[in-house]
Structures are given as structure tokens and as C-alpha cells.
Amino acid sequence: MITLKDVYKIYYMGDNEVRAADGINMHITKGEFVAIVGQSGSGKSTCMNIIGCLDTPTEGTYLLNGIDVSTMNDNELAEIRNKMLGFIFQQYNLIPKLTVQENVELPLLYAGIPSDERHERARYQLKRVGLEGKEKNYPAQLSGGQQQRVSIARALAGEPSVILADEPTGALDSRTGKEVMEFLKKLNDEGNTIVLITHDNSIAVSAKRIIRLHDGKIVYDGPSDGPGAVVNSNVSFADDPLLIKQREEAKRRDEEYKKAMAKGITHEEFESYYKELRKREGSNLKTEASPLITDADIVKAKDEDPLSTVTKLLERSEGIHRGNSEGGGTQ
């Protein structure tokens, strides 16, 4: 579905070289719900732009459904976006002068879909997101949560291979944001592939897999309920043993992945091989000196209100880290 191989995105600011993506290797299969997580400057937006065909890598290869889009021109990228990708934005990006139904139909109009089919698809998706009867309303007549659901309907109307959600709850209150995330989980349960971009741990744990970025590199790639999936973003990367160990592990995994690809091994075969390799070696990323949130904590956070529970866990882990740095031990 989505494969990034040795992807770099390099910018120059005066004499300084900025590696927004620094050797990214990533594979997302059909039907996954993946959160790409990181703080400002981590490279997550760069990855979203590349995955969303809004930009191309400086170096490396990006395959979308087996198609190499790395070197496509702007017109070719626009065609791929219209046919294969659906976007959900933080600020909804609805056109105020168009009705709700017209907003949902707009990408279909650009795609050359006949009017009868456009109307049918738009009405179906609006009903699907719980907005039946709002077709003739204008965006200003809807709440923030309803406007976000219109943007979800618009993303779905094109029947995309991948739904890209960029901070979809960023402009919403916590209750409405939780409703939107529940709907995204429902869409994933129905078989849709969803890639979520966020800086928020409490949102990220709604996904089934987390890819965490720092300085343009992957420092964690694993299940959202696994060790290290949620860490305290206030802790310095250079000082934190868990993040250092994760980065070492990610680097090693990249090296093994390159060897496997060179031998013609598929991604699925590699995942099975690497899992068995780690198991044989008894590899474990947990360290007592790290502000690690346990598997049980994450499960609890996903069952309860993610915002309040994960916030409490992060506050607790920060206290553990502070105690360790002052000479104390893990409680």
C-alpha cells in the first residue's frame, strides 16, 4: 500500500542543511490504522506531504499501491491525489459559499464524475457521517464537529485507497474530538486505511500502530499499546535512555530491512523474520531509569477517556524521570 524506502527531504537555509526526513523506511499495509507522531520539527508534516503526494522526496523511493510517485510532476501528483487519497484537515477547509453537499461533491467534480453519481455519492457519505438532512446547509450553519464530519464525508466520497487525517481534532473541544476519533476507528474497522498525523499522545493511542519521529528519523515503530509507544515529549531526547535505545533499535531495524529488500524478501516476510529475531535475542526496550508508560496503562488509557488518562500518565512519568535525574529511583 504505502512504502517509503530511504526517503530524504533536504532543505537549505543559508549555509545550513535541514533534513526534514532523514532516511525514512516505512511500510503501511491495506487496512491499517497508523499514527505518525512527533513534536514540531520532528518531520511528521514532511512525511504527510510526501505520503499525500503534496511533495516529493529529495532522495529515495515512495510507492503508493505499487506505483512509484517519487519523480512524478505536479499534474501527475494531482491526479494521484484525486484518485487514491482522501484528506481530512484540522481546519476543515470547507468553502463557505458552497452548501454542505456541494463541498462534498467538489473533488468529484474535478475528477470528472457525472452529476447524478456525484449527488448520489455525496448524499450517501453525508448519511454515513450522520449529517442526513444537512445537505443544503452552509458551513457557517454547522458546529465545528459537524464541519469536520463534512470534511470526512468529502474525503470518503472519492473512494480513496488511503485517508490522511492531519491533526483532525486540533480545532475541536475534547468531547467532539473524541467523537471524531471514534468515527475514524469505525471507518478503519470497515476496512479503510487511515494514516493519522498528530503531536498528541492522547490522540495517537486511538490508532493500532504508532510511528514516532524525532529529527526526521523514526525512533519507534510498533503497536500503540507497546512499550515506548507513548513517552513524555518534554523529556530531552539526548537525556532519555528509552528514546536513545529506541533510536538505536530503529537504526538496526532499518539496516536489517535494507538487507532483506536486497535479497528479494517481502515486507511481510521481513516482519515475521525480525519479530522472531528479536524474540530469540530476548531484546527488550524497557529501562528502569526511563519515563516508560506500561502496557497496562496504555490499555487503560484506550478504554477510558484518552485525553485525561494519558495526561495523568505523562505527568506521572515526568515525575519519575525528574526523580531519577535527582538521584532517586523508579517507584
Image (spheres, rainbow, N blue to C red):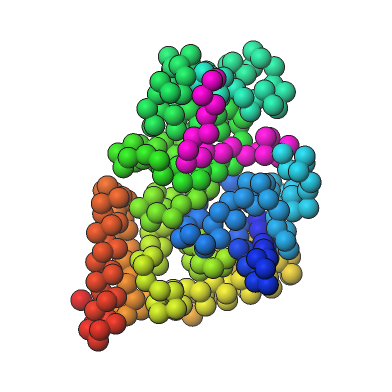
Left or right of 170 on screen, residue 306 = left
Q: Is residue 291 above or below residue 91?
A: below
Which of the pair 296/211 is nearer the observer? 211
Foreground pick, 44 / 294? 44
Left or right placement of residue 139 versus residue 330 in this view: right
**Residue 84 place in picture, x, y as percent:** 66, 38
Q: Which residue, as the protein is rendered here, is positioned at the far left?
A: 331
Give the quarter of the image for residue 76.
top right
Using the rendered image of the protein, determine whether residue 69 is visible from the camera's viewpoint.
yes
- Seen from this angle, which residue lies furthest bottom? 327
> What residue sits 77% from the left and 39% below the top?
75
The front one of 3 and 36 is 36
Q: Residue at x 61, y 31 (%)?
A: 159
Q: Is residue 93 magenta?
A: yes
Q: Establish if 303 lies above or below 247.
A: above
Q: Which residues are magenta?
A: 79-98
Asked if residue 206 lies in the magenta stretch, the reply is no
Can the viewer see residue 185 in this picture? no
Residue 105, x across and y down, in percent: 60, 22
Residue 302 spot, x, y in % from top left: 32, 51
Q: Quadrant of the C terminus?
A: bottom left
Residue 319, percent from left and from top = 24, 71
Q: In the drawing, does residue 76 fall left or right of residue 43?
A: right
**188 or 265: which is nearer to us?**
188
**Point 78% across, 48% down: residue:** 72
Count the marks: how many?
0
Task: Tell me which corner region of the image, top left, top right, bottom left or bottom right, holds residue 321.
Answer: bottom left
The residue shown at (25%, 74%) is: 320
- Residue 297 image-quadrant placement: bottom left
